[in-house]
Amino acid sequence: MGACEPSVLHDNGTAAFTRKVALMRWFGTWVVGLAFGTCAALVSTSARAQSTPARSEAWSTATNVMALSGLGVQLIFPRVFYSDPEVVVGWKARWHVSVLAPTMTIATLALFNERVLKNEIGGHRPGCDEATQGGPGCASYGMLSTQSFMASAAFGQGLGTFLVDTLKWSGGQFNFGAFATNTAVPGVLAIITTAGRGAGNWENAGQAWGSAGIGLLTGLGMGALYAIAQRPECGYSGNLICW
């Protein structure tokens, strides 16, 4: 039988065709596998993007500003008291540099919470859990809420100072100016700050209002102790600024 007989050519042609079919099948399988892999990756990425909790940066900025403003109110506004009739009768106002003591204590506690305490407590933000902690939208914890704590502590400080100044140093006489500057303004800031943390999805209601309650009690205690220890009058000098 010659090398170019029809049967041999047929066999060679069949083998070549078979190899082509196998190659096409392998290539098709590879393409299909790549397509499915790409789709799976896209679906996975989309699912992760959709599961990332949405946070309001506007509310974050607003609550930061309001929490700091609450402390600023305690530094800027004076203590108002009704002067002892034996000295000079009437309402007086004095600015005390010593108010830095309770105010800076609150700021230090807030910083300690932000850097250390909340990591130890480990309260997850809304939409976060152990699997997603550290990822987008879950880079930090939500409890204690630093902003809610600081704003409410500032309110508590003002409330404690106002109560002591009114009941102890003013003989129970009420002054609207002292009430507005020590309690009303920081109180409104504290409420909006705490509500804003929830509205911006930075903390859930329990985390935000629980932190606010702790801050209120902390500030109330410090404000009352400070007002008891530091008389509102500037000694015998009668200066507007007390050191």
Image (spheres, rainbow, N blue to C red):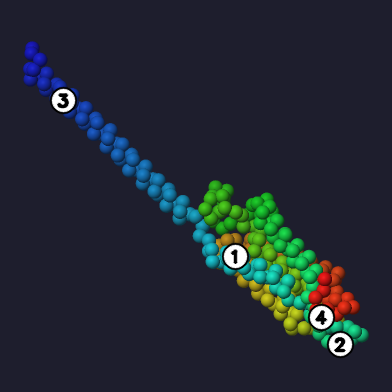
Distance Cα–Cα, label 1 vs label 4: 35 Å
Q: Secondary structure at mark 1?
A: helix
The quarter of the image holding the N terminus is: top left
| 1 or 3: tag closer to the N-terminus | 3
Do we see residue 172 in this rendering? no
| 2 or 3: tag closer to the N-terminus | 3
User: Which residue position is annotated with label 3?
Assistant: 14
Whether pointer 1 and pointer 3 mark residues with C-beta atoms closer than 8 Å, the reply is no
Q: Going by the image, does 84 lie left or right of 54?
A: right
| 4 or 3: tag closer to the N-terminus | 3
User: Which residue position is annotated with label 4?
Assistant: 81
Whether pointer 1 and pointer 4 mark residues with C-beta atoms closer than 8 Å, the reply is no
**Quick one: label 2, few (<14), some, or many (20+) residues within 10 Å?**
few
Q: Amino acid at mark 3?
A: Thr
User: Which residue position is annotated with label 1?
Assistant: 197
- Disc number lying in front (4 or 3): 4
Instruction: Kindly indicate the quadrant of the structure image that contains residue 169.
Output: bottom right
Do we see residue 181 in this rendering? yes
Above or below, 135 against 5 in this view is below
